[in-house]
Image (spheres, rainbow, N blue to C red):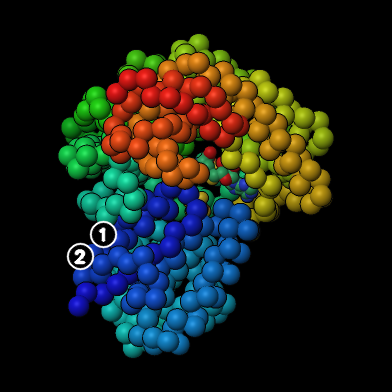
Amino acid sequence: MSKKLYIETYGCQMNFSDSEVVASILKAEGYDLTPEIKEADLIFVNTCSIRDNAERRVRNRIQEFRHLKHLKPTLKIGILGCMAERLKENLFKEESFVDLVVGPDAYRDLPKMITDTADGRQLANTVLSLEETYADISPVRLDKNGISAFVSIMRGCDNYCAYCVVPFTRGHERSRNPFSILNEVSDLIAKGYKEVTLLGQNVNSFAWKDDQINMNFAQLLESVAALSPQLRVRFSTSHPKDISDELIETIANTPNICNSIHLPVQSGSTTTLQRMKRNYDREWYLNRIEKIKSTIPDCGLSTDMIAGYCGETEEEHQQSLSMMELVGYDFAFMFKYSERPDTLAARKYKDDVDESVKARRLDEIINLQQRLSHQSNLRDVGKVFSVLVDSVSKRSKTQMSGRTDHNKVMVFDGLDLQLGQYVKVKCVSCTAATLIGEVVEL
Ligand code: SAH
Ligand code: SF4
Ligand code: F3S
């Protein structure tokens, strides 16, 4: 009988992509994935350290595994990912029933480590690498629909934004061999996938140079898009300091590269951005937005925002709100600042914005975004969009759901439609979160 692996993933899309690599490595060792935790011989939790509450959530969750181990003493439990990297062997002291602690660059070592824990030892490998990209590993897809996949194109980050733990948990930035990226996408197309999202912490700094090719991100994007006109190509995340005219023009000129850019601003205030070490200011960011809007008509724009960063004044917060108004984002991920140990911000600045002030500022940001999202959706009413059908609607089981090119969710009648099909849908009404449409053409 095959052995069963249960994986739970927290954090960003890159972690999801890594869980697919882990599933692939263990499949070669005879482990099949199970959605039933009680059946598992091996439980992995792929963790995130980005904010304190992300770590707390995982800690609470893993407490629930303790009793499973009493029921099945041969069960092994592993903590993978960013928390493993950040806390290393300390996790064994704090969570004594955990068997494995494995950082994001050490997954090839998993089979050996699992064997070596058979005698009850607790083992950690948190060595970071300058080269590892898992380029040759063909991920086991964990997505449910077989339509949309994430493809990791680089790992790590060298930006060291002052508040951010990622450079410490993911190591130095490195790009993946473009041939292996193109092979992976070709394979997805052959399996019927219709959409790929190319992933990295800062995809704009993708760079590959060897004897045969010299490729930047715009060129990679173009090569991926050229594999099939039926394939939608997305990417995440772009750093505003590196988003080039060449990239913006490539998006504009290539029909199947989606007109949607996630460009996290974090703050609208130049002085806050300086303390964040983001390497751009308000004017630079607005200039990039101007370039995008003038080059790509109707480009979807989304962002990440941090409320209550160290030393943030009321005036600086107002600048964030005015930035949101000026850009008119369609969507945003919004967070309260959470101090992360050992980052530059933790060493250099005081986390001095009162919790109640942080909460109030975040509320203001969320409320404003709610209004902007609604306004943005209202602008789409009456327009016709090409929608890739990807699921049955979550809210109403009698409707289908899909995404527009500019990355908005649209729901519409059409239970006879196939998942993975493109349809033309006219937007007839909306809420702040969703477009509601009618199919006008198959
Ligand atoms: N590489 C991406 C973001 C990765 S982390 C980029 O540079 O845009 C995802 C988001 O988490 C960040 O954009 C930021 O908004 C948020 N974040 C990161 N560290 C944080 C912290 N210490 N407190 C609160 N939010 C944080
Ligand atoms: Fe973190 Fe900045 Fe790197 Fe994004 S670019 S992962 S925010 S250090
Ligand atoms: Fe979290 Fe690590 Fe991603 S800290 S956001 S899982 S890179």
| Image location (x, y in percent) of residue 442 | 29, 23
Q: Secondary structure at mark 1?
A: helix
The crowd level at tag 2 (other Cα within 10 Å; few <14, some 14-19, many 20+) is few
Q: Secondary structure at mark 2?
A: loop
| Image location (x, y in percent) of residue 198 | 36, 38
Which image quadrant: the N terminus?
A: bottom left
Q: What residue lies at 42% left-to-right and 41% top-to-bottom?
A: 398
Identity of the amino acid at label 2?
Answer: Ala
Q: CA distance from mark 1 to mark 2?
A: 7 Å
| Image location (x, y in percent) of residue 295 | 46, 12
Q: In the drawing, does residue 252 fall left or right of residue 360?
A: left
Identity of the amino acid at label 1?
Answer: Ser
Q: Where residue 28 is drawn, which disc sits there?
A: 2
Q: What residue lies at 75% left-to-right and 51% top-to-bottom?
A: 351
The image quadrant that residue 393 belongs to is: top left
User: Which residue is tagged 1?
Assistant: 24
